[in-house]
Amino acid sequence: MKTVRWNQWQDFELPSGIDVPRSKVSVIIPAKTGQEQLDICLAALAGQDYPADLMEVIVVDHGSIPALRLPEWVPQSYRIVRHEEGKGPGAARAAGADRAQGEILMFMDSDIIASRSMVANYVKWPAALEESLVLGFRDFIDPVGLSADDVKSHAQAGTLEELLFPRLGQEGQDWIDNFLKRSNDNQANREDLWNVVVGAGLALSRRFYDYIGGFRDFRVHGIEDTEFGFRVFQGGGVIIPDRACHGYHLGLRAMSVSGEKIKRDRRGLLANYIAHDRTRPRLANAVWQVPKVRAQIISLPDDSFETIQATADDLLASSFTDLGIEIFSQDSTTSLELVEYYSANSRVAVLAGSPGAGFPSPFTLRVAAGVKLAVDSVDKILRNALRDPKGVVAYVANSDGVSLEFWRTRALSRAGFSSAVSSGDESRQFVREMFGESWKSGEEVGISRPLEEVVAS
């Protein structure tokens, strides 16, 4: 079972020597205007020490006027595609991924100069740990007077650092350094390890990219990479900051130039799509695109409408309201009654089949139909989960067994992605080993035994 507990990526032993995977990588570069900087970016990539036959480069031009072009000297494996004007960088990255043929997808901005082994250092992680997302680092340099020819010749000679070192500026990314210091290089048991994901440089396996749904288009700069990182994390990804994945940024970063505007433009989207206390206020009965808790009511074929309704209504009456509710009904007549009853309530969905992970909500609550919950039950359950982190906590309300389970969605998601898991029992064992499990009394959080019978009034 090649994975790690939680996000403890430094425990993973990378293969070395002849065991190093030889994976094809697709380097995807969204670009809009800036022909000169694109040429410099491509010049550095042409001097990589990664095998040329295992590397393709896809430049996605999203609305440049005049259109961007590839320099004559680039290898045949480099190509440029045009994407619809007006779409954001997230859509451009997705368009590049759609055309990519590599087993590994690497995304970088067109204002980055890659150090000689940058691609190789990116590839090694997702080639060995398929659910990993590796993040790169960059220094900021003065680009004035720098030419693509200079970068190309130095990159191929292996002397790129000599060319760029005198151009290093004072600007850094202190907020990332400070976060990594506080989080033990992103290995601490925290709910916000997605926070350091920046689209200027990252890589992951094609299979995991597809698993979490790829990049989305928000048309607003600065949200697409954060939201992508959030879904990677809730999808069970291992987020790895590797300083060996190093490049140089041409000029100042965008947040230095227009940071306040970027923050204003994206705050509404962050609140809706990033379920975290830092991005949204706690408002009674507010409805967000991605709720913090996804509650799933699991019913049996003979469960009545009233039995299921009682549990759903308890959840709706909860003092914790940042939750969505999915009802899995096994009877078509009961399902129709439930759909009609909750038709005007956007927090409730009636579904067929079996529940999966509540992705991308951070927490998945599974409760048997008929279980009674107190008004503050979900609040107490969530506080327990944050105080004593486990992959799953089972609450027992009577001698009949588990009445409610509270899962970290990323634990369920990683189990679902793992090729080592093929059944429900194996999934639970996987979560137990990688994230931990505990059992608690339902009474301490206000859960009472399932109703024997609910009589319609």
Image (cartoon, grey):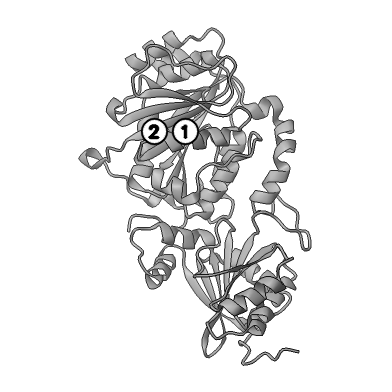
Which of the numbered marks, if any, corresponds to residue 137? none
Q: What residue do we see at 63% from left, 36% from top? A: 222
Q: Splitting the image into 4 quarters, where does residue 191 fall? A: bottom right
Within 10 angstroms of label 1, few (less than 14), some, or many (20 or more) residues? many
**Residue denoted by label 2:** 26
Q: Is residue 146 left or right of residue 274?
A: left
The amino acid type, in three-letter code, at marker 1 is Gly
Quadrant assignment for the C terminus: bottom right
Q: Splitting the image into 4 quarters, where does residue 381 fall? A: bottom right
Please, is residue 251 above or below residue 335 in the view? above
Within 10 angstroms of label 2, few (less than 14), some, or many (20 or more) residues? many
Mark 1 and 2 residues: CB-CB less than 8 Å, in contact?
A: yes
In this view, the mark in front (1 or 2)? 1
Front residue (pair 157, 424) = 424
Please, is residue 105 above or below residue 113 in the view? below
Front residue (pair 98, 89) = 98
Please say whether residue 453 is visible from this viewpoint: yes
Q: What residue do we see at 41% from left, 23% from top? A: 79
Q: Position of residue 235 (x, y in %)?
A: 50, 54
Please say whether residue 243 is visible from this viewpoint: no
**Residue denoted by label 1:** 96
Q: What residue do we see at 47% from left, 57% from top? A: 6
